Image (cartoon, rainbow, N blue to C red):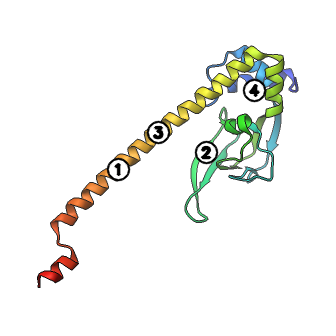
């Protein structure tokens, strides 16, 4: 274990928020929290960048204090703000599992305190507390599954909007003759 008792007591309840891993027990959360390290970030610190391959990305963060801006690339060089995450939110749980580059850029907006869990610490939990590790991984899997379902719902809504726009365009194009058809009739 890496974290002091006082920090473990601070971190564990935040692991149990709806924005983190609500399905864990408090005792499970305390065990996981014991393997986390705490860091302070200054405002405007880039926590990690999307698709960056030259740095380690095998960790996740739990926000203990402050706000982190989540952005993703849009067309060209512009970015889209996806979310602003605060106390009790997890960031990077996919990367702690697979170590692949991040899908978004995260930047501290205020002074931020985070608890960090690396993949090697996760492997240590698996070795030393396999039952708790299984529940922890199931909680992460549930969180990711919920996100996939939400993404699927959003895609369905976008598909429906797209279909409605296409239908409206078809109706409008049937009402007015095409410019080549009008010229041929002359």
Residue that numbered label 4 is attached to: 11
| Mark 1 surroundings within 10 Å by alpha-carbon count, few (fewer than 14), some (14 through 19), many (20 or more) | few
Residue at the farthest left position: 186
Residue in front for this viewpoint, 87 or 89 = 89
Residue 14 in picture, x, y percent from top left? 69, 27
User: Upstream in the sequence, badge 4 or badge 3?
Assistant: 4
Residue under the image location 44 percent in, 42 percent down: 154
| Mark 3 surroundings within 10 Å by alpha-carbon count, few (fewer than 14), some (14 through 19), many (20 or more) | few
User: How far, Cα to Cα, is label 2 from label 1?
Assistant: 26 Å
Q: Which mark is residue 152?
A: 3
The local secondary structure at tag 3 comes to: helix
Where 47 falls versus 119 (above or below)?
below
User: Upstream in the sequence, badge 2 or badge 1?
Assistant: 2
Q: Which mark is residue 84?
A: 2
The local secondary structure at tag 1 comes to: helix
Does any portion of residue 95 appear in the rendered image? Answer: yes
């Amino acid at each position: 274990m890496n974290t002091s008792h006082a920090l473990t007591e601070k971190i564990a309840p935040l692991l149990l928020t709806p924005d983190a891993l609500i399905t864990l027990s408090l005792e499970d959360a305390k065990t996981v929290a014991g393997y986390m390290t705490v860091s302070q970030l200054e405002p405007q610190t880039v926590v990690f960048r999307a698709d960056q391959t030259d740095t380690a990305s095998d960790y996740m963060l739990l926000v203990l204090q402050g706000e982190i801006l989540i952005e993703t690339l849009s067309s060209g060089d512009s970015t889209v703000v996806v979310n602003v995450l605060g106390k009790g939110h997890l960031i990077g749980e996919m990367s702690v599992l697979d170590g692949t580059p991040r899908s978004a850029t995260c930047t501290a907006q205020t002074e931020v305190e985070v608890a960090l869990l690396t993949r090697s610490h996760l492997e240590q939990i698996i070795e030393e507390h396999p039952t708790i590790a299984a529940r922890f991984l199931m909680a992460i899997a549930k969180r990711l599954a919920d996100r996939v379902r939400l993404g699927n719902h959003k895609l369905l809504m976008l598909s429906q909007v797209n279909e409605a726009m296409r239908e409206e365009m078809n109706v409008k194009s049937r009402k007015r003759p095409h410019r080549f058809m009008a010229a041929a009739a002359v």
